[in-house]
Image: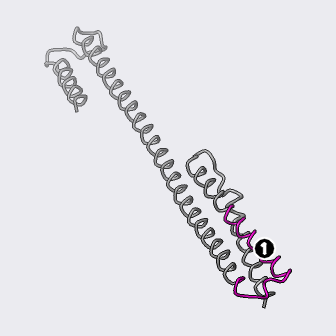
Amino acid sequence: MRVLDAVGGLVELSGKFRRQGPEEEPLTGATAKPGGALEARLAGVLVAALKEAFDRDSARLELERSQVEAERRRVEQALRAELRRQAAERALAHLRLISMIAVGVWALSAALSVWRPGIRAIVPRTLLGLGWASSVAALGCAFAGWRSILKWSADSADENQEPLTATLAPWLLVLALALVATSLLAGL
């Protein structure tokens, strides 16, 4: 608004110098009259003021553009951190469930092996021992995976999704279930 006011004032001022009476002859150049030099200087000042205003506006727009870009990057980084946190929570809940099932399989198979006299034979006892070992290994992998996932969720540079121990834990649990079930069936 100040620039427009200044431009308007300059136009009015130059209009006063331009006005000619009927007896005056028309100007042929900027230096034909003493007012022509003034008009040329005023036009130069006007151009300089406009150029400065445009330069200021373009600098301000560039600053705003860089601030918007920085804000966008910050929001994207926050979104990635939130997604990483949610993925870590899901993985930890998965490992918690695996560890509870592993302990439950071990406890239930121990209780059933005491009540079933056929489990004392060599083959069912070996299968039960392998099932228990597999159940304990699944529990150990779940604990190791828990620690790895906590480390993974804190490190923003690491893009690895899931550690090997966390991937191995459910398969060891499935193996434990199969071995314990086979030993209980063999003991019937």
Question: Of 80 and 52, which appears nearest the observer?
Answer: 80
**Residue 32 relative to residue 180: left or right:** left
Q: Residue at x 58, y 53 (%)?
A: 150
**Residue 184 relative to residue 5: left or right:** right
Q: Position of residue 115 (x, y in %)?
A: 70, 87
Q: Position of residue 79 (x, y in %)?
A: 49, 53
- Magenta region, residue range: 113-140
Q: Residue at x 42, y 42 (%)?
A: 68
Is residue 181 depicted above or below 36 in this figure?
below
Quadrant occupied by the N terminus = top left
Q: Which residue is mark 1?
A: 129
> Residue 53 is drawn in which quadrant?
top left
| Amino acid type for the residue under numbered disc 1 | Gly
Judged from the image, the secondary structure of the residue bearing numbered disc 1 is helix
Quadrant occupied by the C terminus = bottom right
**Residue 68 relative to residue 8: left or right:** right
Prevailing secondary structure class for the magenta stretch in the rendered image: helix
Q: Residue at x 56, y 66 (%)?
A: 93
| Residue extending farthest right | 122
Question: Of 79 and 155, which appears nearest the observer?
Answer: 155
> Residue 118 is drawn in which quadrant?
bottom right
Q: Is residue 43 magenta?
A: no
Q: Position of residue 174 (x, y in %)?
A: 72, 74
Question: Of 78 and 180, which appears nearest the observer?
Answer: 180
Q: Residue at x 42, y 38 (%)?
A: 67
Q: Position of residue 84 (x, y in %)?
A: 55, 55
- At label 1, counting other C-alpha atoms closer than 10 Å, the crowd grade (few under 14, some 14-19, many 20 or more) is some
**Residue 139 relative to residue 25: left or right:** right
